[in-house]
Image: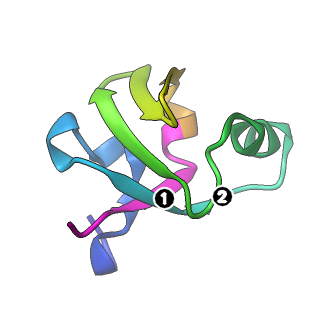
Amino acid sequence: MVANNIAPLAVFSEHDGSLEIVDVIGNDAHSRRLCELGFCVGKRVSVVSRGDPAIMNLGGSRFALAGELQERIFARPVKS
């Protein structure tokens, strides 16, 4: 992980608990689609299963995200 525990989703695992999205890199169709699906700054997400694709839980829904998309979304663990 990098400073302040902020890192791409790809480095987190199901053991990290709830994560807060702090940035989505890029300004293209993929980045816009991620935000349409709910992967936006301030939203909470958790990793169900690591891999390529990884399974993410967001707002009660599960999404499979390819590795390249996981690298665009930066998050940090939510302090309990």
| Residue contact at pointers 2 and 1, CB within 8 angstroms | yes
**Residue 24 x, y percent position in the rendering:** 63, 57
Name the N-terminal-most of marks 2 and 1: 2
> Which type of secondary structure does the marked residue at label 1 adopt?
strand
Q: Is residue 7 above or below residue 44?
A: below
Q: Nearer the viewer, residue 27 or 58?
A: 58
**Residue 63 x, y percent position in the rendering:** 52, 22
Q: What residue is rendered at 22% in x and 39% in y?
A: 13
Q: What residue is rendered at 27% in x and 46% in y?
A: 12
Residue placed under numbered mark 1 in the picture:
74
**Residue 26 x, y percent position in the rendering:** 74, 55
Residue 15 relative to residue 78: left or right: left
Part of the protein shown in magenta: 70-80
Q: How is the image coloured?
A: rainbow
Residue 74 inside the magenta-drawn segment: yes
Q: What residue is rendered at 85% in x and 38% in y?
A: 29
Residue 13's disc is none
Give the CA distance from mark 2 to mark 1.
8 Å
Q: Is residue 29 above or below residue 60?
A: below
> Which type of secondary structure does the marked residue at label 2 adopt?
loop
Residue 25's disc is 2
- Mark 2 residue type: Ile
